[in-house]
Every structure is written in C-alpha cells, then in structure tokens.
Image: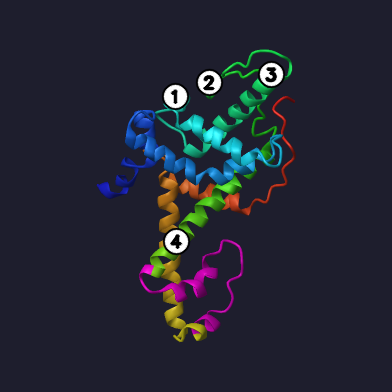
Amino acid sequence: MNSSAAAPFATTRWTQVLAAQGGSEHARVALSELCSAYYGPVVAFLEHTGCAPEEPREVAHEFFAGLLARDGLAGADRQSGRFRSYLLGALKHFVANRRRRASRRKHGGQAEHLPMELGTDTGFEVPTPTEAPNLDALFDHEWAVTVVEGALAALAHESIAAGQDRQFLVLKPWLSFAAEPGSQASAAAELGVNEGAVKVAIHRLRRRFRELVRAEIAQTLPAEGDVRAELRHLVEALAESPVVPEWDPNR
C-alpha cells in the first residue's frame, strides 16, 4: 500500500480547522489563510447582493471577521464538506441576516443576531442553486480564477528563484486553459534554444503548474476529499462567464 497518496490530506488547512473547530492557534491561522484566498470570490458575490458600489469590500471584511471569531464555524461539518461549499452557504446566510438587521433598524425594531449556521431558517428566502445558478456560478468562477492565479504566482516565484524568469514569461501562454499559445518554434527562437528544448520545458512547466493547482485545492478539502472531482469542477467553472442579476435575499 502506498501511504504517500493519503499523506497530503492529513495536514490540509481545512482539516486543521475542522479538527479544532477554529479553537487552536494553528486552526485560526489556517482559517485566516483560507479566508484570504477567498477574498475575491466573496467580494464578487457581494457586488450582486444589493450592496452600494462602495460597500462590498467593507462588507467582505465584516463577513470574514465573523468567520474568524471563535464561534464562526458553528455550522461546519467536521466529517465532510469542501471549504468552498461551506463558505458559499455561510455567505448566503450572512447576507440574509445582514438584510434582516437592516430591515429591523429601518422599521424601528431591535436588530436580532442570527448565528451563522448552515441549514437554519433565517426568515428570508436564500436562493438555492436551482433558483440562482448564475450567482453560484459567479462565486465558483471567481474561486477557480483565484486558484489558478495563485498557482501561476507560485510558479513565477519558483522560476525567478531558479533564474528562469525569462523562460517562464515566454512559455506562460502554454499554461492557459483557453487561449491559443502560439508557435513553439517562435518561442524557441525567442529563447535561443531548439524546439525540442521548448517542448520539454513546456511539459515541465505544465506538470509543475498542475501540481501547484492540486496542492492549493487539496488545502480546501477534508481528509477524504476528492481532488480529481474538485479539479474537474475548477475547469468547468473557468469555462463559465456568468451574467449575474442583482440578488435580493428578501424576494
């Protein structure tokens, strides 16, 4: 039995958080790292939930502050679940709770605090994936872009450290999921090497890029998480370019 296949999951950031429910310093650091990686998707989601144009970033900070509080993971399932899925559910409830508080203030009532737990009735209709597929697709698309950009940044850093920054810049188009990279012969001429060397370099870059993407995804899964399935979802999400209507959790 090859134990190395299971080893990467033993110390993932999300596994650490779930094991301690955010109570230990290591878990809080791990959760903070996960939250920082998901800042972009959360802001993109909030831009379509009735926030004023200047509000999404401020509201995102408020949302993450709640998650980073000691009771912020009250609804997280210790046994299963992706961080991406948990975060999207928690974000929907946060928006609905925030709207409820605003409505109470507007009508002179006392603001009621609602715990950020999944599966609870907030008193508002939170759209399900079938009711608001575009909004869910937007969040997943931004998540996928964030993962890919993070992997590219890490690969660029490695290339610079190895003195191969010029090669990385020339061959980076071959890492794209969609764009046509161009001619390998032209890349070889630009780098002053033969075409065979370019093919080998592209193969190595792609392999390392896939490793970095897989490593980042694995950090957001539970111990038994399926990285392959999440990778398939990432590729599908990248192919989406959702047009998102305004979402009002009151409707």
Q: Are marks 2 and 4 in contact (CB under 8 Å)?
A: no
Residue lying at 36% horizontally and 42% vertically, measured from the top left: 12
Residue behind mark 4: 209
Which-is-in-front pick, marks 2 and 4?
2
The percent coordinates of residue 184 (x first, y second) are 53, 79
Magenta-drawn stretch contains 194: no
User: In the rendered structure, which segment of residues is drawn in magenta?
Assistant: 161-188
Left or right of 44? Residue 38 is left
Q: Position of residue 1 (x, y in %)?
A: 24, 47
Residue shown at 64%/34% (left/top)? 129
- Amino acid carrying label 4: it is Phe
Disc number placed over residue 115 in the picture, else none: 2
Of the two numbered discs 1 and 4 in the rendering, the one whose residue sits closer to the viewer? 1
Distance from the alpha carbon under mark 2 to that under mark 4: 39 Å
- Residue type at mark 1: give it: Asp
Q: In the displayed structure, would residue 201 be above or below residue 85?
A: below
Task: Residue 140: give x, y in percent of width and height.
Answer: 58, 44
Q: Tell me which label, 2 or 4, sits earlier in the chain.
A: 2
Question: Which of the 4 quarters of the picture holds residue 179?
Answer: bottom right
Quadrant of the image occupied by residue 105: top right
Q: Nearer the viewer, mark 1 or mark 3?
A: 3
Which residue is the site of mark 1? 71
Of labels 4 and 3, the one closer to you: 3
Question: In the displayed structure, would residue 96 be above or below residue 162?
Answer: above
